[in-house]
């Protein structure tokens, strides 16, 4: 009888749920803002957060804040927290592939829902909808890793500035 290595469990990603956790809208200058010419500067801030829920389940929260300003006047501020629950089976906890999925793939699945919520909420304020451009979260994650590696290499450089390998 030969000892065969156990076959690793297949790796699977399952979307369990997409949900809107929180949304807020502010139109601080209403109704006066609607009585003037309005050519705002749009600022979009996007962030992600991952929380383990146990049993290979993870909550990935995508936060999107859209602010429209003209000068110092804020026309509207919309904030959306769109969440997703994902099951990642067959991945070792903390392995790079698992982290890449949680930071790159999962936010990309959630983003279209957040984009639709933002567009709808902005339109409900009386302004034309804001159509957020697609975001490549996987590329952003790779850039983040490259910055971390560069900072780590700079931090372990010698007194003469040489990098220690």
Image (cartoon, rainbow, N blue to C red):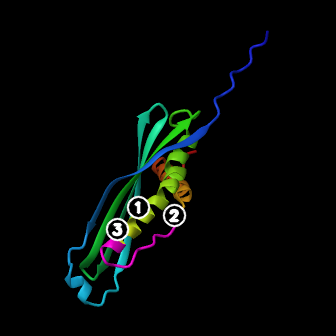
Dot 2 crowding, Cα within 10 Å, few <14, some 14–19, many 20+: few
User: Relative to 144, does residue 66 appear above or below in the rendering?
Assistant: below
The outermost residue toward the bottom is: 37
Among the two numbered marks 3 and 1 on one chain, the one whose residue lies closer to the N terminus: 1
What residue is shown at x 47% (from left), y 53% (from top)? 151
What residue is shown at x 50% (from left), y 37% (from top)? 94
Residue of label 1 = 46
Horizontal arrangement in the rendering, residue 139 relative to residue 73 (left or right):
right
Q: Position of residue 153 (x, y in %)?
A: 51, 50
Horizontal arrangement in the rendering, residue 142 relative to residue 80 (left or right):
right
Quadrant housing residue 69: bottom left
Q: Are marks 3 and 1 in contact (CB under 8 Å)?
A: no
Magenta segment? 123-134
Q: Are marks 2 and 1 in contact (CB under 8 Å)?
A: yes
Among the two numbered marks 2 and 1 on one chain, the one whose residue lies closer to the N terminus: 1
Q: Distance between the Cα atoms at labels 3 and 1?
A: 16 Å
Residue of label 2 = 135
The outermost residue toward the top is: 1
Q: Which mark is residue 121?
A: 3
């Amino acid at each position: 009888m030969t000892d065969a290595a156990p076959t690793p469990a297949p790796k699977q990603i399952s979307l369990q749920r997409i949900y809107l956790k929180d949304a807020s809208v502010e139109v601080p200058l209403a109704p006066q803002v609607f009585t003037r010419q309005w050519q705002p500067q749009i600022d979009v801030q996007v962030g992600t957060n991952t929380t383990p829920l146990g049993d290979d389940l993870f909550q990935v929260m995508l936060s999107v804040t859209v602010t429209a300003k003209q000068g110092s006047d804020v026309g509207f501020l919309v904030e959306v927290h769109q969440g997703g629950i994902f099951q990642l089976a067959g991945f070792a906890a903390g392995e790079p592939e698992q982290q890449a999925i949680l930071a790159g793939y999962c936010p990309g699945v959630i983003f279209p829902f957040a984009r639709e919520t933002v567009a709808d909420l902005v339109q409900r304020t009386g302004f034309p909808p804001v159509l957020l451009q697609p975001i490549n979260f996987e590329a952003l994650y790779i850039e983040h890793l490259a910055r971390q590696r560069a900072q780590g290499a700079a931090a372990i450089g010698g007194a003469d500035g040489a990098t220690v390998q």
